Structure formats: structure tokens, C-alpha cells
Amino acid sequence: MKNKDLRVKNHPILGKEAKREKITILVDGKKIPAYEGEPIAASLTAAGIRVFRYTSKDKEARGVFCAIGQCTDCVMTVDGVPNVRTCITLVKEGIRIKTQEGLGKWKKKE
Ligand code: FES
């Protein structure tokens, strides 16, 4: 089955989608298409990715819940930094995103 782009192209109130630059992001080492200026969570959701992290105690899957930066269910490790709220963090070309296990691990400084 072909992966359908779930982005809203023509919103009844906001109108047609603005033209944006297509970029590539890396999610768990896999290249995912994204559009400049959209939140990481939007790119992942459009790509069919629903699990963003696993809880530390029971290893339960979590993803987008509030989508306004309040609940922290969507946190992932972004460019080596854990606990980044992906619903309010914008994508950029080449950004590296990892599914987070528990509280995440900080990249050691060199
Ligand atoms: S989904 Fe709640 S903080 Fe991102």
C-alpha cells in the first residue's frame, strides 16, 4: 500500500497550503521527506510514524497527545539532545531524530 500524504492541502478556513521547500530528515537512520517550517511531529505523522518514545517504567509507546507543547508525550532525541518536544520544534534539513527510550541519553561532550 502506498503511503498517502496526510497533510491538509486545502483547509476550509485557512485556505490552500503555502508552497514550502521539501527537505529530508533522518528518523532512526531512515530518510523521511518533510517541508521546511513544519513541526517534527507533523513530518512524522505525515510519514505514518505514530510512536515517538517509550516510557521509562513500563516501556509503553507514546506519541502526539496535546500537540501544543504541554504534555511531553511527543519527546524524542533530536540531534543528540533528549526530551525535545517535537510538536513545537520545527524541522530543518538533515536533522537527526531518534525514538526515545525512557528519559533518553545525553550525547557526551568531546
Ligand atoms: S504532544 Fe504534548 S508536548 Fe508535544
Image (tube, helix red, strand yellow):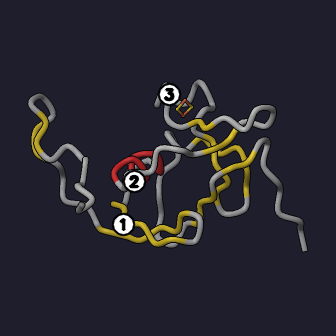
Q: Quadrant of residue 13?
A: top left
Image coordinates for residue 76, horizontal then vertical, percent: 64, 48
The residue lying at 55 percent from left, 30 percent from top is 69
Residue at mark 3: C-beta within 8 A of ligand 1? yes
Residue where numbered disc 3 is placed? 65
Q: Earlier in the sequence, mark 3 or mark 2?
A: 2
Q: Earlier in the sequence, mark 2 or mark 1?
A: 1
Which mark, residue 5?
Answer: none
SS for callout 3: loop
Pick the front one: 4 or 42: 4
Residue 42 versus residue 12 in the image, above or below: below
Q: Earlier in the sequence, mark 3 or mark 1?
A: 1
Name the quarter showing ligand 1.
Answer: top right
Quarter of the figure that contains the N terminus: bottom left
Give the alpha-carbon distance from disc 3 to disc 1, as whole Å.
22 Å
SS for callout 2: helix
Give the alpha-carbon distance from disc 3 to disc 2, as whole Å.
15 Å
Which mark, residue 33?
Answer: 1
Q: Is residue 58 left or right of residue 60?
A: right
The residue lying at 47 percent from left, 67 percent from top is 25
Image coordinates for residue 57, horizontal then vertical, percent: 81, 32
- Is the C-beta separation of discs 2 and 1 under 8 Å? yes
Residue where numbered disc 2 is placed? 43
Residue 37 versus residue 67 in the image, above or below: below
Image coordinates for residue 59, horizontal then vertical, percent: 72, 38
Q: Amino acid at mark 1?
A: Pro
